[in-house]
Image: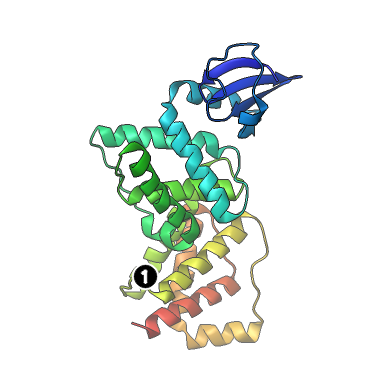
Amino acid sequence: MKISRVLNNNAVVVKEGDSEKIIMGAGIAFQKGKNDVIDQSKIEKVFVLKEEGHKFQELLSTVPEAHIAVGEDIISYAERQLGMKLSDHIHISLTDHLTFAIERLNQGIEVRNKLMNEIRILYHEEFKIGQWALRHVQEKLGIAFPEDEAAFIALHIHTAKMGDAHIEDSIKKALILQEASDFMLKDLGVSISSDSISYHRLLTHLEYAIHRFYENKPFHTLDDDMLKIIKKKYKKGYKTAQSAAAFLQQKYGVAFPESEMAYIALHLQRILENI
């Protein structure tokens, strides 16, 4: 393979037929130029980003190489920990995010993640990877991020894990979860630790319910007799579940059937019993 364009010491563009590929590897472009042959032994990663290839090329040629290297370290670590290959888009989104996060921190601007508790609970594996990433950034770049940044990184990893290209979808779902759980607890008139098992179970159930709605998958069903029993026995929880469902439908267009409200009522009942 011959080099079409050098992006930095560790990344080049090559052409194969009608397609362009980005080849990455430590020192792969050192003392190399256009039309030089690539040392195959130095190839670590190959990308074909059809729609956003030019954006990735621009990032690789303008972002500090140390930031790119750290971003790739985080992605490789995440893939090992999760035992899967992440969507190629993360090589753009995470590198871009890290660069802006570092710039903000250097300017004394600290961005808080209001969804950190929800992300920590729902995307536990990804959050742990985010925590590792913070240690790695400090070790390699001497930059100490607040823990909120672990949640931002976790969202990027979760988005890539699900095969999505847009982190906005993950943020929206996490925001819906936060607003739904806050609404329910306020409606019940209770306060509960975000570390409690009952709260974890409620959030996890809500996540699956919201996922089923957006993926247009069938909800769990309940027979009519069981539904009547739950409505009668757990009136307070069911009323709150109904109110929350109406709130979500009005604000986000998320619709839950009666059976789903009943399952949510069971989780709310556990919370009431454990106060």
Foreground residue, 262 or 37?
37
Foreground residue, 135 or 231?
135
For the C terminus, the quadrant is: bottom left
Would you name the residue on which mark 1 appears? Answer: 195
Foreground residue, 55 or 207?
55
Please tell me in which quadrant of the rendered image residue 175 appears. bottom left
Task: Tell me how many marks there are.
Answer: 1
Q: Residue at x 54, y 41 (%)?
A: 166
Where does residue 184 sit, x and y in percent of width and height? 40, 69
Please tell me in which quadrant of the rendered image residue 141 appears. top left
Where does residue 177 sit, x and y in percent of width and height? 45, 60
The colour scheme applied to this rendered structure is: rainbow
Q: Disc 1 on helix, strand or loop?
A: loop
Is residue 118 found left or right of 25 in the rendered image?
Answer: left
Where does residue 2 sit, x and y in percent of width and height? 68, 17
- Whether 62 is drawn above or below 124: the answer is above
Question: Which residue lies most toward the right here?
Answer: 17
Where does residue 237 sit, x and y in percent of width and height? 44, 78
- The answer, for residue 171, to whether it is visible in the render is no
- The answer, for residue 265, to whether it is visible in the render is yes
Is residue 240 found left or right of 2 in the rendered image?
Answer: left
- Whether 259 is drawn above or below 174: the answer is below
Amino acid type for the residue under numbered disc 1 = Asp
For the N terminus, the quadrant is: top right
